[in-house]
Image (cartoon, helix red, strand yellow):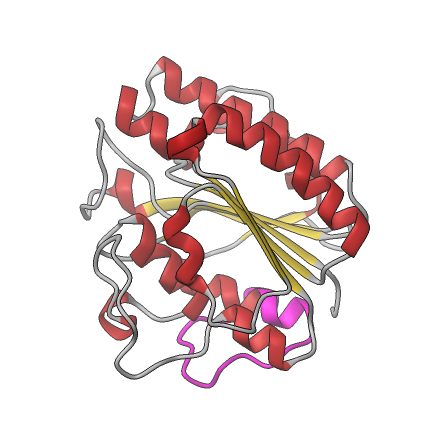
Amino acid sequence: MNKKVLLILSDGVRPDSFGRIAGISDYSDVLLRHALYSMKTKTVMPSVTLPCHMSLFHSVPPDRHGILSNTYMPQVRPIKGLFEVLRAAGKKTGIVYDWEELRDLSRPDSLANAIFMSGHIYDYWNTCEKLTERAIDYINSDAPDFVFYYYGLTDAVGHGSGWMSEDYMKAVSKVWTLIEKLVSSIGDYTVIFTADHGGHDRTHGTDKPEDMTIPLIISDPSLETRELESASILDIAPTVAAILGAQPDPEWEGRNLLA
């Protein structure tokens, strides 16, 4: 396809927390008008934020990249991640995030731009709004080929008030409102929406379906809406690479969902 891609991840969002499944009308309905999607996408164990993100960007399970907690450790036998693959293909990439541990998703000299504001220090309810505005300005001024936007609000509220609680549902709704503002304010991008893991009670990290099942929406006007028979978080990096016309790393284990 060789288009530009905006990958949006809302930390800890369960598929049953938004849209028609939850009986809520939100921007997900708009994205699904032209999309490949799966509300039964599988994440990896442990279903913890940094291991899941490493698997998303490196298309291998945690027992291969070696990150088993939210503490980053250099890979013993390194695998190139999505940022490195896109850099080698001559693509300009950026990241917008409010959880600092994600700084290790890319290796040096892979990113063109990184925009960070700590949700722990400034509060995730504030950072999600301020970073959305900064992301709009950045994308419109720099026109990057690939942008990863991370929303930490939903996970923070899940831990604080419980998954599927009233506060959690308000956080999910807030994120969808900001996604609508972001997508409607920028140019022509294929938009991919997903999560790293789900959650139950006030935690996650187990092999419970509530923790292991995530949403995945690949939205583009050129697509006819179709539900994917199966999908994994490992499939996201190869799919993004294919959309951008880049070659996946030979060690990646996921597949291009558009093939």
Residue 170 in view in this figure: yes
Q: Taking 13 as reference, is 193 above or below it?
A: below
Q: Is residue 232 magenta?
A: no
Q: Is residue 232 visible?
A: no
| Residues drawn in magenta | 240-259
Q: Residue furthest top?
A: 166
* Residue 26 % position (x, y): 60, 25
Look at 43% across and 20% down and name the residue there.
169
Give the percent coordinates (x, y) of residue 255: 48, 71
Whether residue 201 sits left or right of residue 78 in the image: it is left
Q: Is residue 113 above or below residue 176?
A: below
Residue shown at 37%/38% (left/top)? 12
The quadrant of the picture occupied by the N terminus is: bottom right
Which secondary structure dominates the residues rendered in magenta? loop
- Picture quarter containing residue 32? top right
Q: Residue at x 43, y 62 (%)?
A: 105
Indicate left or right for 67 with 96 as reference: left
| Residue 190, position as x, y percentages in the image | 70, 54
Q: Along the horizontal axis of the image, is 28 left or right of 171?
A: right
Q: Classify residue 228 as left or right of residue 86.
A: left
Residue 252 in the magenta stretch? The answer is yes
Q: Residue furthest front?
A: 121
Quarter that holds the C terminus: bottom right
In this rendering, the answer to whether 120 lies above or below 80 is above
Residue nearest the observer in this picture, 59 or 70:
70
Count of marks placed on residues: 0
Q: Residue at x 56, y 71 (%)?
A: 110
